[in-house]
Image (cartoon, helix red, strand yellow):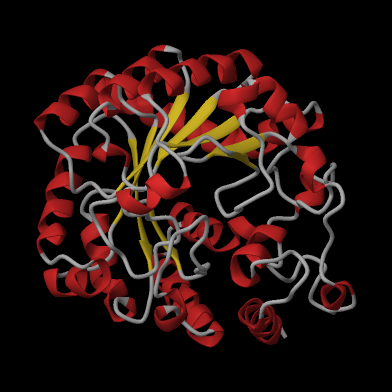
């Protein structure tokens, strides 16, 4: 087991260190190197800030979950088109009764697989599955350090203990484990305690406080619970100070990556490709397929989209960039001093915040101004 764990972790480490430049080269050739299969919008938690969770009754009014046979067939098409790594996510993907069928088939195709889960549904069956077919990486969400906080954030106190049980199980399989926390007003005071729990299982601990509004028919309380721009940067500063105090270059570098992933110097990696309104790899070498079968540049978009299950993966992928050619930034953004790489005003975020690509968001503007103020 130790040998397998070491080998799997080394694969994850090598992939993490090379993915950006590898994906940039793929983007230049419009190869769909990395994708996300969002298997469901259902979740057994009801987090206040979730931007995608849907009740089954509401899902039926929007579309239908794609079958295991459809996902497996699409995975084969994606592999043929050049996809190497897949993120399996939801909602909570382990909620699907046919998850093991989908996951096993995809693993046998040879993808580099990352799994997103809240870990609460882990059991002996899934533990056996993941030991047989270990995902290269697993990202586990941890929303609090106590049952009381889980009750506030996720709607259930008992799921705190289920999360810890799931962490115990997943930490025993040969994978690169990362624990992640989204911070809102209800759990922000528990950063140290949450980090301590995470560090029992892994040194990879990531925090996020940039919260978007709900999209694609979902609803949330995000506007009432998300942190102010000042609180966001204070949280990141406090977390950075913790890692700096360790005097460990590897862990300092890890923390910095968490904070800068969304603001990478994209032109240095050749990302300045059409559609130029997307300054990342979305629709260039990365894609997202929603639970109801829409291909999007990333999971933060609601549209426009193509339909890979109906028109075929390759055709859907080839058409995707053209849907964004005529989309530009709002006029106010074009003359703003923060617009050029200093603001997270990407079309997906503007769409989720305002319902349009043409309007600005006071929340996003406030984040850009606070970032600039701190840099000065």
Height in image: 25 above or below 54?
A: above
The image quarter containing residue 263 is bottom right
Left/right placement of residue 344 relative to residue 245 reads right
Q: Please tell me whether residue 11 is drawn above or below residue 216 in the rendered image.
A: above
Q: Residue 366 appears at what percent x and percent y?
A: 64, 84
Q: Is residue 150 visible?
A: yes
Q: Residue lying at the far front in this picture: please name it.
A: 61
Q: Residue 166 sits in which quadrant?
A: top left
The residue at the point 16 percent across, 65 percent down is 156
Name the quarter where the C terminus is drawn.
bottom right
Against 179, residue 373 (above or below) is below
371 and 50: which is toward the camera: 50
Q: Left or right? Give the position of 312 relative to 57.
A: right
- Coordinates of residue 295 in the picture (x, y in percent): 61, 37
> What residue is drawn where x is 55% and y is 49%?
299
Q: Which residue occupies 38% across, 71% down?
A: 183
Image side of residue 207 versus residue 34, left or right: left
């Amino acid at each position: 087991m130790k040998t397998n764990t070491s080998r799997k972790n080394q694969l994850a480490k090598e992939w993490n260190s090379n993915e950006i430049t590898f994906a940039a080269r793929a983007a230049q050739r419009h190869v769909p190197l990395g994708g996300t299969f969002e298997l469901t919008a259902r979740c057994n938690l009801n987090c206040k800030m979730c931007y995608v969770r849907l009740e089954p009754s509401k899902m039926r009014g929007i579309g239908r979950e794609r079958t295991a046979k459809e996902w497996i067939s699409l995975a084969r098409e994606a592999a043929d088109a050049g996809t190497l790594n897949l993120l399996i996510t939801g909602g909570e993907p382990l909620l699907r009764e046919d998850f093991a069928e989908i996951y096993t088939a995809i693993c046998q195709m040879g993808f580099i697989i990352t799994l997103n889960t809240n870990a609460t549904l882990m059991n002996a069956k899934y533990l056996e599955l993941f030991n047989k077919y270990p995902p290269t990486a697993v990202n586990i969400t941890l929303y609090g350090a106590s049952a009381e906080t889980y009750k506030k954030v996720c709607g259930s106190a008992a799921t705190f203990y289920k999360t810890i049980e799931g962490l115990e199980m997943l930490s025993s399989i040969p994978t690169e484990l990362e624990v992640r926390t989204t911070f809102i007003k209800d759990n922000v005071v528990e950063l140290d305690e949450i980090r301590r729990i995470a560090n029992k299982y892994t040194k990879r601990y990531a925090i996020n406080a940039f919260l978007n509004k709900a999209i694609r028919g979902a609803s949330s309380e995000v506007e009432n619970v998300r942190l102010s721009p000042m609180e966001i940067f204070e949280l990141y500063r406090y977390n950075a100070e913790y890692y700096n105090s360790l005097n460990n270059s590897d862990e300092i570098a890890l923390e910095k990556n968490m904070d800068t992933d969304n603001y990478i110097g994209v032109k240095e990696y050749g990302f300045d490709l059409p559609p130029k309104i997307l300054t990342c790899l979305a629709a260039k070498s990365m894609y997202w397929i929603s639970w109801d079968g829409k291909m999007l540049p990333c999971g933060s978009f609601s549209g426009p989209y193509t339909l890979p299950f109906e028109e075929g993966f390759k055709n859907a992928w080839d058409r995707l960039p053209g849907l964004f050619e005529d989309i530009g930034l709002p006029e106010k953004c074009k003359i703003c001093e923060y617009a050029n790489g200093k603001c997270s005003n990407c079309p997906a975020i503007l769409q989720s915040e305002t319902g349009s690509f043409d309007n600005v968001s006071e929340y996003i503007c406030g984040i850009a101004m606070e970032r600039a103020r701190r840099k000065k």
